Image (cartoon, rainbow, N blue to C red):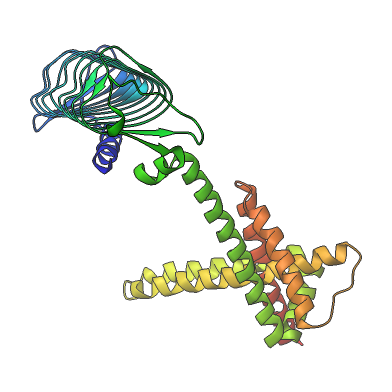
Amino acid sequence: MRRAALAGLLCTITLAAIPAAAQDRDDGTAVLGFGGDRYAAGEDLRLDQETAGDLFAAGEELDLTAATGGAVHMAGRIVEIAAAPGGAVYAAGYEVAVSAALTGAATLFGAEVRVEEGVGGNLRLFAQDAEITGPISGSALIAARELTLDAPVAGDLMLAADEIDWGDAATVAGRLILYVEEGARTEVPDRVAPPDRVERREMEEFRGDIGPSVADLRRGAVRTALFGFVMSVLFVAALATAAVAMAPDHVAHWRETALARPGRSVVAGFLLLSTIVGSGFVLALTIIGIPLLPAFLFGAGLAGYAGYVLGSYILGVGLWQRMGNDIPEGVVRKAGLAALGAFVAGLVGLIPFLGWLVVLALAFAGLGAIVLHTREGQAA
């Protein structure tokens, strides 16, 4: 499975980066030959030229009718393989049809997959509807909603399917591992495999045997995103609370300045960050100052994040006051306001584009409040 995934990734990356030196045909396709391999991309590809090495092809409709000395990697909406390659086959599409007798292994992905002739090695097939009428010389791993198997399998067969149609020619010489839903019983005729070679397992085990499903990956991504969001909110709230606890008077003055003059605070924060970053690049022009540029950029990032932490706390206080409440006393209660501001800022930050602008405005406002208060203190 890892080999199939790497091959598919290699096919995608390579075809997406076919250089301008590739030969452009009259039909709008681009073909590149290099090191005996052939790379082809286009809307409607008729692959009718022999390839000494491996073949990589991607397009709307792909039709392979010429011999290939190595492996074949194809991806498209409709993929047809009518000529047997010398190596393995990796094909993905909405419709995948293999009408040639393959000499090697095959890995096929699609909504509708048909294998009309034999497969000389192992078969890995994942589809919505699958039909296999050619013999499998090796073992087969098949996952499909509806499967028609009307051919012998010389090795083991691992199968997960909701509906199975066993054809007259269907036989399994090795083990038949059948995954079924809990409580369901899928009958296997004795002519396909005797009962002592049939092993039934729960469908839930299938994920553990071949890896996580798309649904599992999606749920894992959601859990990771939620965990990251919660930890970010808690971290920002903790930093704001620490600032309130260690310098309550300063934080109070910064908060009052930002709430009284939000526009000037944003401008002052923007100017300060611009000055730090700009100074770093200007210093780098002296050549000897180039090693100091990362320090300036790091300092700008640190200052921006400090401004965001303070801005989140100020946002929480502002929202609390908008609801008609007075600012509470005590570090613990103010920590609640910091958490409120960090939570709202985090939610708004999830909005594409607009959220990023709001996050920047909060960072500028928090940093600018410090700048304005410092200037006023110096003037006094």
Residue in the foreground of this view, choosing between 36 and 75: 75
The x and y percentages for residue 5 are: 29, 39
Residue 338 lies in what quarter of the image?
bottom right
Q: Is residue 46 above or below residue 301?
A: above
Q: Residue at x 16, y 16 (%)?
A: 101
Callout count: 0
Q: Residue at x 62, y 51 (%)?
A: 350
Residue in the foreground of this view, choosing between 19 and 237: 237
- Tell me the quadrant of the picture where the N terminus can be found: top left
Q: Residue at x 20, y 19 (%)?
A: 135
Q: Does residue 350 appear to the left or right of 263 in the view shown?
A: left
Q: Residue at x 50, y 40 (%)?
A: 215
Residue in the foreground of this view, choosing between 31 and 291: 31
Q: Is residue 309 above or below residue 227?
A: below
The x and y percentages for residue 24 are: 23, 19
The x and y percentages for residue 172 are: 24, 25
